[in-house]
Structures are given as C-alpha cells and as structure tokens.
C-alpha cells in the first residue's frame, strides 16, 4: 500500500485532491499535514475524516524535526506539496511569510524526502532512491508573468514573476529542479491556471464576487477589469495532478489549464447575470501593484504525454459553485 503525504491538504485544492484519491485508489493511505492557517479548515475534509486510510496532522512544513518524524512514522512513499501562502494581495503586504513558507518550507520537504528515500543512508549525496517514490510540487502559471494575446506559455518559457507570491513560487520551483539535477530526486512540477469550484476561501475572485453578490454588497474589481485569466474547475486540476503523480516523466514540468480565458469583468458580469443582480453592484477600485495583464498556458504537453484534458463546462461549473455558496450562506436562490 502506497502512503502519500499531502501538505496543505485542508485547503481548497488539496481537500478536493484527497477526497478524489481516497475514492479512486483503495490501496492508498494519505497523511495530510496542514498548519490550518486562515484559508485551511478541517471542515473541507468532513467526508474523509472517518476513513481509516486517512490521517490528519497539524504541523508546519518549515519544522525539520517534525517533518522527519512524520516521514519516519508513516514511511512516506510520495509527496504532493500544496502547502503555500497563495493570495497575491497578502503577499504585497506580508512578503516574508510567503518566502519562508513557500521557499524554505519546500526545501525542508525536499531535504526530508531525500534523506528518507535514499538507498544509502550513510552517503549524503546518494543519487539512488527507493522504487516508486515521487515529489510533486504544486506551482502556478503566475511564475511566468504576463503574456500578450494570442501567445501562450510553454514549459520552456522563462520565469518572470511580478509579485512576492509568484516570486516565492518560482523560487520553490527552481529548488525542486535543483534537487532533481543535483541528487537525482524523482520530482515533477505542475503549473496551473486559476482554479474555481465549491469550497474555495472567499478571498479569491470567484468566491468573493459570489458571496458579495448574494449579500448585495459591492463587487470590487481592480482597474478596468480587463485582466485575463484562464479558468479550470478544481476537479479537472485534481485529475491532472493524479496523472502527473503516477505517470509524469522524471524531472518534467507540466502546464495545466482549462482553456477558458475570460476577463475579470466577464466573470463578475456572468455571476451577476446568473443571480439576476444588477451590474450597478460592480465597483471599480484602484489596481493592485504588479498586477499581470494576462496569463495563458499551453497544455499540449500534458495532453500528449499523459492523455489529460479538462472536462468541465465553465458556466455549468460556475452555477454549481454559486449554489454551493448559497447553501453555505443559507440563501435560497434560483439561477437564471
């Protein structure tokens, strides 16, 4: 039986991934390590909390001694690292916590995995590791910076991060690649576009706009609202991560995207339309520093190598997400 360490598994994407993996693979054990900061909650994992193959540990990935103890006690075979500070606005105000969690935390996990998995415990530079081990780093398309229409980022595109958040994720990616090159550690990196779906913390665009609209509050839109993002349903993202974890080639990067480019204003207006709310709720606010104009990734590599493609229709997925938030807020609604 494989034991998978999921870090940050009480967050939005991590909790969806854990639920999917436990359902799909009856011979997998999952150890979820999460510090339970503001965006993580065990409420996201209610459906799996009674599963005997699931273990939750509240801990900080920056704590070397704690991580070594977890690897040893549970004999970890694979790691998927979701644990990260991820909100760009917060990174502008508090860059230090992004650097320590996203960069140092990743390096601590890599060191721990290397030391636990190497076949020669006495050799600090051992390049031989146990069969079947894998470290999958969850990154973001934001590490590439902005790109003009109609171009798309490939896995070979240079890294040009614009915010402390994206810079910290780019730094973590480079460390992961360095461990693959220096030590031969089996790794992959995924770089995904914007996720949406039920359960997302309401600081990100879609859940914030939905909850504000449900409460008839102003919907704050940065600048002119014409910043473009590629949107993917969280379930499609999790399917891609499953494919990369189990079939990704050693040391490879994989872009993951939904092929659904929309401006922020498009998203906000569609939410208002589905809820039957007026556009007058839109409130344009000063743009944030380092706000990239457009992200778009080329997903042909993961499609061609691993046979993955997104399946969710955006509007249908958005309807499902709105209904989830309405239930959470105890609002009775009928979508148009």
Image: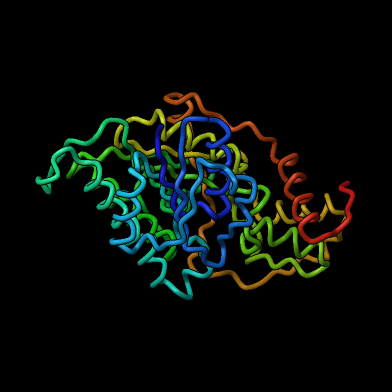
Residue 224, by quadrant, is bottom right
Q: Nearer the viewer, residue 206 or 284?
A: 206
In the figure, 212 relative to 6: above or below? below
Pick out the residue farthest to the left: 123
Residue 311, by quadrant, is top right
Q: What color scheme is it?
A: rainbow
Which residue shows up at 72% across the image and 48% down it?
321
In the figure, 63 relative to 4: above or below? below
Q: Nearer the viewer, residue 106 or 317?
A: 106
Which residue shows up at 80% across the image and 55% down it?
326
Residue 152 as seen in the image, left or right of residue 263:
left
Q: Which x, y percent locates residue 234? A: 60, 43
Pick out the residue farthest to the bottom: 93
In the figure, 282 relative to 133: above or below? below
Q: Which x, y percent locates residue 90? A: 51, 70
Q: Which x, y percent locates residue 178? A: 23, 48
Q: Which x, y percent locates residue 332? A: 89, 55
**Which quadrant, please, contains the N terminus?**
top left
In the rendered picture of this protein, how many numbered marks are placed on residues? 0
Which residue shows up at 38% across the image and 31% down it?
248
Which residue shows up at 38% across the image and 72% down it?
96
């Amino acid at each position: 039986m494989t034991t998978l360490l999921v870090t940050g598994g009480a967050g939005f994407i991590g909790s969806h991934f854990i639920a999917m993996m436990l359902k799909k693979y009856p011979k997998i054990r999952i150890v979820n390590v999460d510090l339970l900061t503001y965006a993580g909650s065990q409420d996201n994992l209610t459906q799996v909390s009674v599963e005997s193959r699931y273990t939750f540990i509240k801990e900080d990935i920056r704590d070397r001694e704690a991580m070594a103890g977890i690897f040893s006690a549970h004999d970890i075979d694979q790691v998927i690292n979701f644990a990260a500070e991820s909100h760009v606005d917060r990174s502008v105000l508090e860059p230090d916590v992004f650097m320590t969690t996203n960069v140092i935390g990743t390096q601590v996990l890599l060191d721990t995995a290397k030391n636990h998995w190497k076949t020669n415990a006495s050799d600090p530079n051992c390049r031989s590791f146990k069969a079947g081990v894998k470290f999958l780093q969850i990154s973001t398309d934001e590490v590439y910076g902005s790109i003009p229409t109609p171009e798309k980022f490939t896995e070979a595109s240079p890294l040009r991060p614009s915010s402390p958040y994206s810079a910290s994720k780019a730094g973590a990616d480079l460390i992961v690649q360095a461990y693959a090159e220096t030590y031969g550690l089996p790794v992959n990196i995924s770089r995904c576009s914007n996720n949406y779906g039920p359960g997302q913390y309401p600081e990100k665009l879609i859940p914030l706009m939905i909850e504000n609209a449900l409460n008839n509050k102003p919907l704050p839109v940065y600048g002119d609202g014409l910043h473009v993002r590629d949107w993917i349903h969280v379930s499609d993202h999790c399917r891609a991560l499953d494919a990369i974890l189990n079939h990704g080639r050693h040391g490879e990067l994989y872009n993951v995207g939904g092929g659904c480019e929309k401006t922020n204003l498009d998203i906000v207006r569609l939410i208002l339309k589905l809820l039957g709310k007026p556009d007058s709720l839109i409130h344009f606010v000063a743009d944030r520093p380092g706000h990239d104009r457009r992200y778009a990734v080329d997903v042909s590599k993961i499609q061609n190598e691993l046979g993955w493609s997104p399946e969710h229709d955006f509007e249908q997925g958005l309807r499902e997400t709105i209904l989830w938030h309405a239930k959470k807020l105890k609002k009775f609604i009928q979508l148009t």
